[in-house]
Amino acid sequence: MSLAHAAAEYMLSDALLPDRRGPRLQRLNLELPLDRIVKFVAVGFPLLLMSLAFAQEFSSGSPISCFSPGNFSARQAAYVDSSCWDSLVHHQPDESGRHQLKSLWPHKALPYSLLALAVAMYLPVLLWQYAAAPALSSDLLFIISELDKSYNRSIRLVQHMVKIRHKSSDPHVFWDELEKARGERYFEFPLLERYLACKQRSHSLVATYLLRNSLLLLFTSATYLYLGHFHLDIFFQKEFSCSVKTELLSDETDVPDLITCRLTSLSVFQIVSLSTLAIYTLLVPVIIYNLTRLCRWDKRLLSIYEMLPAFDLLSRKMLGCPINDLNVILLFLRANISELISFSWLSVLCVLKDTTTQKHHIDTVVDFMTLLAGLEPSKPKHLTRQISDENP
């Protein structure tokens, strides 16, 4: 074995990816980074506010303080506070002297409304986990495995070409067989290409992804309506007039008709309302951006994997509408790029290819590794001239 042939063998052996069998790829990210941020904020923030509301209620005692008459005992004053908090109705006199009733129940329901908001925001996450994540996981496992295997098959093919060239005594026979193999597409691996083309005609993943983000926008809009309809009307109301002359106390002359109460938890109510409005307003552009990513292809990822055989045909098929399962899979391949060992190798080869295309016609990793192994990617010119001279 010549020194050049041994060096080519060592170089190609080092370019092979390690065989990853057994329990592998168990750390697949089945959520995009921005989707994970939206999930943590949309679900975690109302839970944080709920804990703040409960902590304020437990630490400060009663969330209201009523100004009971001076002749009331401590137990009677405590009863007034408890009764007014249970009813939480403001008696507002109108021009005719009657009292209009105005409910202040959002103060009492604040922690539970935050809990309901957190549960509603978690429903799209559950939808994605149970409706799309299992199928997406199997797709990613197969595609990542096949991409790395396609790269390894290309390297092994070059190793085989180098061995044949080294053993062949007649260079004409070798180059004739090589050009025949290229013409018959022996160097291409259509299984992965056809699988991805099939995913381009599928729309289950993209429909679930669109539904997930649409539900987030719907629940966010419902939150705006709730805050605007129920919280805005009582946002600045610090005091309310409460009536305790009910049931046994309805005929008591010593009990005033209305007792003024102050909402001691109003500041917490205002902070929760404003912060909820601000946070979910910031989340809306992120959700919309997640949806707009489905309207374009990840051309950088595709251009790198066009170095594998048959991927040029795939790129030509991607000139249509990108709203399909294949685009979703490409987004998650980008999120799991650390699992694609072949990506780093192909990225380097793409950079090197750009520096050599002026001298050599290089389309795939087979052509480039053939050149690095010391073989011409196409039949040398002197052999072509020699054949033309022999057959004038």
Image: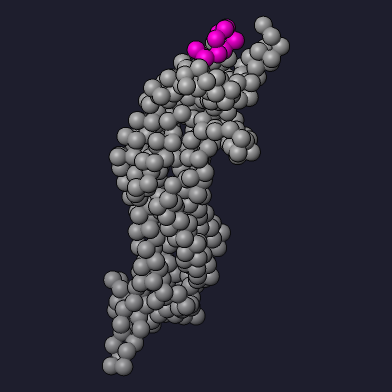
Seen in the image, is 47 located left or right of residue 212? right
In the rendered image, residue 17, in percent from the top left (x then y), is placed at 57, 22
For the stretch drawn in magenta, the main secondary structure is: helix
Seen in the image, is 95 located left or right of residue 45? left
Report if residue 249 lies within the magenta region: no
Q: Bounds of the magenta span?
A: 165-174
- Residue situated in front as seen by the camera: 376 or 11: 376
- Residue situated in front as seen by the camera: 4 or 328: 4
In the rendered image, residue 138, in percent from the top left (x then y), is placed at 39, 29
The residue that appears at 42% across and 50% down in the rendered structure is 296
Is residue 258 visible to us here?
Answer: yes
Q: How many labels does the image show?
A: 0
- Residue situated in front as seen by the camera: 223 or 18: 18
Seen in the image, is 59 located left or right of residue 322? right
In the rendered image, residue 217, in percent from the top left (x then y), is placed at 38, 58
- Residue situated in front as seen by the camera: 112 or 100: 112
Q: In this view, does 12 lie above or below 124?
A: above
In the rendered image, residue 327, in percent from the top left (x then y), is placed at 40, 43
The residue that appears at 43% across and 58% down in the rendered structure is 288
The residue that appears at 47% across and 48% down in the rendered structure is 35
